[in-house]
Image (tube, rainbow, N blue to C red):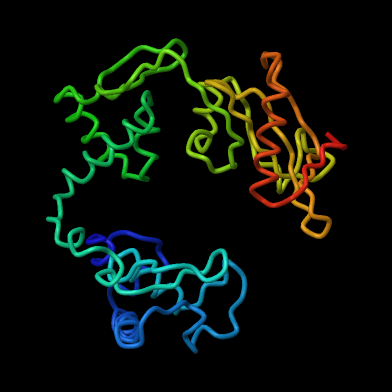
């Protein structure tokens, strides 16, 4: 946030508001301070804009204020639109009063947190988890390895790997879940393939005739393996969760279809829809 405030971080289109157009952003900040939480659509200068990617100068300025820590998300309007408020009015005082770490300590803390989340990971995966700069991540990994927090390990087929010193090795994993396309477990597609032998791609933008598995496909985790995938569609008008196709992996265990059906039923109940597997 400090780097963004100085114009050294954040998307290119936002950085101008840290320097020559800073006064414009500060005027938006003053309005939020006086009038309370505001969404981009509440500002007159933004009127007439539409679509996710048609960012007005107002939106860019607000996003710079967000990246720089002057404001944060108080809530959302609808599914996506952020409603901004002053950071000190959203976060507890005990949080905002904490000391700010140095850049070096911050990178180390983020790399260590990434390692804790992954268990085992490559240097690239540790860096990508919080989108850290390559050189800063490299130095943090080196220092954490010297301190014994990161332990180098050998994995067949991997060039290198790191393991957090406190990583647990469970005797068994009892898991059952349908995974959204951006679930952390499958976010890094190459890692997913290396760990599970599971090739997964989003096919929303693939022409229908060229899709392998479907339009909106959710992988199915069972135990410690990805064993199937299901192409789903919520038909709100007919109040049905349509299972348009199911594809089992070649090594899926015998109880995988029953477990998948159970999980689909849970999802249908959560969505308040009737499960319809006639096309699967």
- For this view, does 39 lie left or right of residue 2? right
- What residue do we see at 64% from left, 22% from top? 227
- For this view, does 173 lie left or right of residue 7? right
Closer to us: 135 or 44:
44
Q: List x then y, in percent, for residue 35.
A: 35, 87
Closer to us: 280 or 4:
280
Q: List x then y, in percent, for residue 226.
A: 60, 24
Closer to us: 275 or 164:
275
- Image quadrant where residue 178 sits: top right
Q: How many marks?
A: 0
- Image quadrant where residue 211 sits: top right
- For this view, does 228 lie left or right of residue 2? right
- Image quadrant where residue 86 sits: bottom left
Q: List x then y, in percent, for residue 156.
A: 44, 10
- What residue do we see at 52% from left, 29% from top? 190
Q: Quadrant of the N terminus?
A: bottom left
Q: Is residue 42 above or below residue 131?
A: below
Q: Quadrant of the C terminus?
A: top right
- For this view, does 180 lie left or right of residue 272? left
Closer to us: 119 or 121:
119
Which residue is at the far right? Answer: 278
């Amino acid at each position: 946030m400090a780097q963004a405030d100085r114009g050294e971080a954040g998307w290119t289109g936002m950085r101008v508001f840290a320097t020559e157009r800073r006064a414009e952003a500060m005027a938006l900040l003053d309005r939020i301070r006086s009038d309370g939480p505001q969404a981009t659509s509440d500002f007159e200068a933004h009127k007439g804009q539409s679509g996710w990617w048609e960012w007005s100068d107002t939106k860019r300025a607000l996003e710079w204020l967000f990246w720089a820590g002057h404001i944060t998300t108080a809530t959302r309007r609808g599914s996506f639109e952020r409603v901004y408020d002053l950071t000190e009015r959203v976060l507890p005082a005990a949080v905002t009063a904490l000391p700010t770490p140095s850049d070096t300590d911050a990178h180390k803390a983020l790399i260590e947190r990434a390692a804790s989340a992954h268990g085992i990971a490559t240097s690239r995966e540790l860096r990508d988890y919080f989108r850290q700069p390559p050189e800063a991540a490299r130095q943090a990994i080196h220092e954490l390895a010297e301190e014994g927090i990161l332990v180098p390990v050998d994995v067949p087929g991997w060039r290198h790997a790191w393991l957090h010193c406190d990583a647990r090795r469970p005797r068994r994993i009892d898991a059952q879940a349908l995974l959204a396309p951006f679930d952390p477990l499958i976010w890094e597609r190459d890692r997913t393939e290396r760990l599970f032998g599971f090739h997964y791609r989003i096919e929303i933008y693939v022409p229908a005739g060229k899709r392998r598995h479907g339009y909106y496909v959710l992988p199915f985790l069972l135990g410690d393996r990805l064993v199937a995938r299901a192409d789903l569609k919520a038909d709100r008008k007919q109040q049905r969760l349509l299972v348009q196709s199911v594809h089992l992996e070649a090594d899926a265990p015998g109880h995988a279809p029953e477990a998948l059906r159970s999980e689909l039923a849970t999802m249908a109940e959560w969505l308040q829809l009737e499960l319809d597997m006639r096309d699967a």
